[in-house]
Image (cartoon, rainbow, N blue to C red):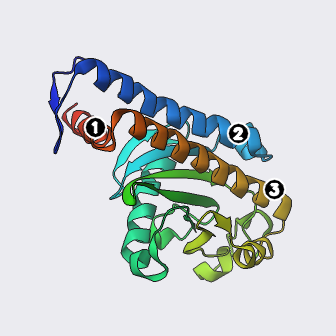
């Protein structure tokens, strides 16, 4: 893609070489997210079927990057993030080191087995982006093993409903919520490892994006992220 010099919203012009370096680094971060998720996960749904995806998002939930795996997972995480912003910005709040878990179809998920964990990313105390991971889970409770509850007559019978609870609070895993979730699945070892794989993937993405913004400046990287979205819309 040929890119002309871009004007950052509140900073100097971005030269084309910097634009290309940052653009490709953003894609590399998402690829490293996927490598981390597959390396930690013990579920064949992730390691063999690759029924997952990762992505980076603007602070408002707009998609910046996505992996080549199951594309609709990345799209739904945009809705997941916007639901969390809408419902939980004030209470319990969105702060550095937090991560939220959601599988509610009425709040952005496709169905309950597709579990998303999303993490806000802060630079200098300012919320600049999100990292997200989503993967299909082998069992998230409900009336039938595998959470394929074809006989259900109401959503509560299908599987557990996670509306976007703060599973990681300031970098610490909440043990009370963790044990609650593990108690509602028939496969706690598999689900638990997958959730920790998604947490690890988000930690890697947050670390890499922070390093990128510290090197090139947060405003420059944010401008390039916005320009990527604009270029995609034009194409």
Label number found at residue 38:
2
Mark closer to the chain start, 2 or 3? 2
Tell me the element at label 2: helix
- The answer to whether any part of residue 25 appears in the image is yes
Tell me the element at label 3: helix
Label number found at residue 220:
1
Q: Which residue is mark 3?
A: 190
State which quarter of the image contains the C terminus.
top left
Label 1 neighbourhood size at 10 Å, few (<14), some (14-19), many (20+)?
A: many
Nearest the eye: 195 or 168: 168
- Residue 160 is situated, as x and y percent measured from the top left of the image, at 67, 75
- Residue 164 is situated, as x and y percent measured from the top left of the image, at 53, 72
Total numbered labels = 3
Label number found at residue 88:
none
Residue at 29% across / 26% down in the picture?
Answer: 19
Label 2 neighbourhood size at 10 Å, few (<14), some (14-19), many (20+)?
A: many
Cβ–Cβ under 8 Å for marks 1 and 3: no
User: Between tags 2 and 1, which lies in front?
Assistant: 1
């Amino acid at each position: 893609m040929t890119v002309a010099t871009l004007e950052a919203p509140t900073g100097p012009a971005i030269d084309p070489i910097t634009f290309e370096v940052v653009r490709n680094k953003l894609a590399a971060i998402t690829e490293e997210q996927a490598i981390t998720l597959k390396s930690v996960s013990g579920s064949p749904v992730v390691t063999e079927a690759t029924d997952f995806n990762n992505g980076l998002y603007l602070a408002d939930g707009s998609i910046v990057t996505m992996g080549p795996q199951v594309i609709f997972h990345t799209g739904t995480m945009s809705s997941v993030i916007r639901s969390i912003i809408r419902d939980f910005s004030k209470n319990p709040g969105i702060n550095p080191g937090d991560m939220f878990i959601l599988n509610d179809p009425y709040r952005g998920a496709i169905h309950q087995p597709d579990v998303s964990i999303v993490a806000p990313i802060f630079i200098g105390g300012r919320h600049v982006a999100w990292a997200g991971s989503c993967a299909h889970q082998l069992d998230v409770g409900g009336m039938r093993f595998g959470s394929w509850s074809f006989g259900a007559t109401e959503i509560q019978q299908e599987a557990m409903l996670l509306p976007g609870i703060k599973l990681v609070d300031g970098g610490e895993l909440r043990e009370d919520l963790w044990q609650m979730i593990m108690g509602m699945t028939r496969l706690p070892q598999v689900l638990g490892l997958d959730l920790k794989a998604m947490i690890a993937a988000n930690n890697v993405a947050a670390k890499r994006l922070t390093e990128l913004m510290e090197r090139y400046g947060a405003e420059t990287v944010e401008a390039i992220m916005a320009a990527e979205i604009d270029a995609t819309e034009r194409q």
